[in-house]
């Protein structure tokens, strides 16, 4: 794929995730519910993930190592859900 | 669309409900902010804000430099829901007002969505 | 192994999508609708990744994955900015 377009798309996606992360941070500030702090963290990691993917040289895009970063983000979300359910309401 | 969803999307407070029903009751009249405020015993600034929100939500239209407001649902679906709302206001006003008060903040609803076991009150 | 990583991401996103949709059904809150849409698309993004890397290594789905992710995050931001009280 055209690298310029890919760069542009990755930048947009990364920025979007980062902004969503800031919203979750604000929700956390308002509600003090840990779930939002964890979601914010996960979305910031997703933003970094996209940024790293875009900056990495082409051949390493095929290495799944960077996708472990994405896995980390989703594991944090999973943990947030489990945590929400184990806590006393 | 269910009435609950309509309320969640368009009626943040009971003031919104009162202003909407008032305008809906007089569909041919164009109301000035101050007249609506006087009629419903609401502060004018509050009334202006509520009316502006109802305009954004496509339930009311504004016209003129110093705007006058008239009930005018943007879609047939909105008209139907407003009709149901008015009917509910006549037959079960307490239930209606409770539904508006019982709305959780969106962030609360978001967090609660991840509770696998829901308490009974959340399920209604 | 890498396939499992992609599928686990997809499964997590799907769980979020379903829970948020269920929450939307019970509260009607529009924010939940838009966020469930976002997680639904993120599920798709991860499934595409799995298809791209594991199932069909010969086909390049990169552009589709990018577009799906972009729309996903756009939906979430739309909900957060315009549809949340």
Image (cartoon, helix red, strand yellow):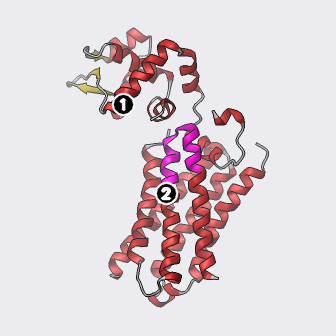
Residue A4, horizontal then vertical, whole percent? 33, 79
Label 1 SS: helix
**Vertical order, A65 against A36 (above or below):** below
Q: Is residue A83 visible?
A: yes
The secondary structure that dominates the magenta segment is helix
**Vertical order, C42 against B113 (above or below):** below
Residue at point 50% right, 45% down? C31
Residue B49: name its quadrant: top left
Could you give the CA–CA distance between mark 1 and mark 2, rounded to whole angstroms? 26 Å
Q: Is residue B100 magenta?
A: no
Q: Chain of mark 2?
A: C
Residue C14, horizontal then vertical, whole percent? 58, 60
Q: Chain of mark 1?
A: B
Instruction: Please identify the quadrant where the N terminus of chain B is shown.
Output: top left
Q: Is residue C24 magenta?
A: yes
Q: Is residue B49 visible?
A: no
Residue at point 26% right, 14% down? B29
Check the image and name the residue furthest to the left.
B64
* Horizontal side, residue B94 vs residue B29: left or right: right
Q: Are marks 1 and 2 on the same chain?
A: no
Mark number for residue A16? none
- The residue to which callout 2 is attached is C38
Residue C74, horizontal then vertical, whole percent? 42, 57
Residue at point 39% right, 9% down? B39
Span of residues in magenta: C20-38
Q: How many marks?
A: 2
**Vertical order, C63 against B17 (above or below):** below
Instruction: Please identify the quadrant where the C terminus of chain B is shown.
Output: top right
The crowd level at tag 2 (other Cα within 10 Å; few <14, some 14-19, many 20+) is many
- The residue to which callout 1 is attached is B78
The crowd level at tag 1 (other Cα within 10 Å; few <14, some 14-19, many 20+) is some
Label 2 SS: helix
């Amino acid at each position: 794929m055209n690298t310029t377009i890919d760069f542009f798309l990755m930048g947009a996606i990364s920025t979007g995730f980062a902004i969503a992360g800031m919203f979750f941070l604000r929700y956390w500030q308002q509600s003090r519910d840990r779930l939002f702090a964890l979601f914010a963290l996960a979305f910031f990691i997703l933003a970094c993930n996209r940024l790293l993917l875009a900056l990495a040289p082409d051949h390493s895009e095929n290495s799944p190592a960077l996708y472990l970063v994405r896995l980390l983000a989703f594991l944090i979300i999973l943990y947030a859900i489990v945590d929400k359910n184990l806590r006393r309401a | 669309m269910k009435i609950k969803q309509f309320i969640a999307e368009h009626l943040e407070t009971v003031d919104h409900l009162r202003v909407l029903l008032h305008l809906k009751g007089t569909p041919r009249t164009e109301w000035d902010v101050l007249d609506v405020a006087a009629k419903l015993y609401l502060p004018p600034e509050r009334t202006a804000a509520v009316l502006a929100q109802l305009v954004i939500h496509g339930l009311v239209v504004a016209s003129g430099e110093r705007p006058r407001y008239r009930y005018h649902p943007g879609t047939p679906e909105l008209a139907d829901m407003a009709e149901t709302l008015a009917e509910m206001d006549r037959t079960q006003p307490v239930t209606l007002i409770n539904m508006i008060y019982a709305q959780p903040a969106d962030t609360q609803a978001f967090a609660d969505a991840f509770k696998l076991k829901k308490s009974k009150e959340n399920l209604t | 192994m890498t396939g499992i990583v992609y599928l686990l991401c997809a499964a997590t996103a799907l769980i979020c999508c379903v829970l948020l949709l269920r929450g939307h059904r019970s509260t009607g809150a529009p924010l939940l609708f838009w966020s469930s849409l976002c997680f639904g698309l993120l599920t798709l993004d991860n499934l595409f990744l799995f298809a791209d890397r594991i199932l069909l290594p010969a086909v390049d789905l990169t552009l589709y994955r990018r577009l799906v992710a972009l729309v996903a995050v756009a939906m979430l931001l739309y909900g957060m900015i315009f549809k949340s009280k």
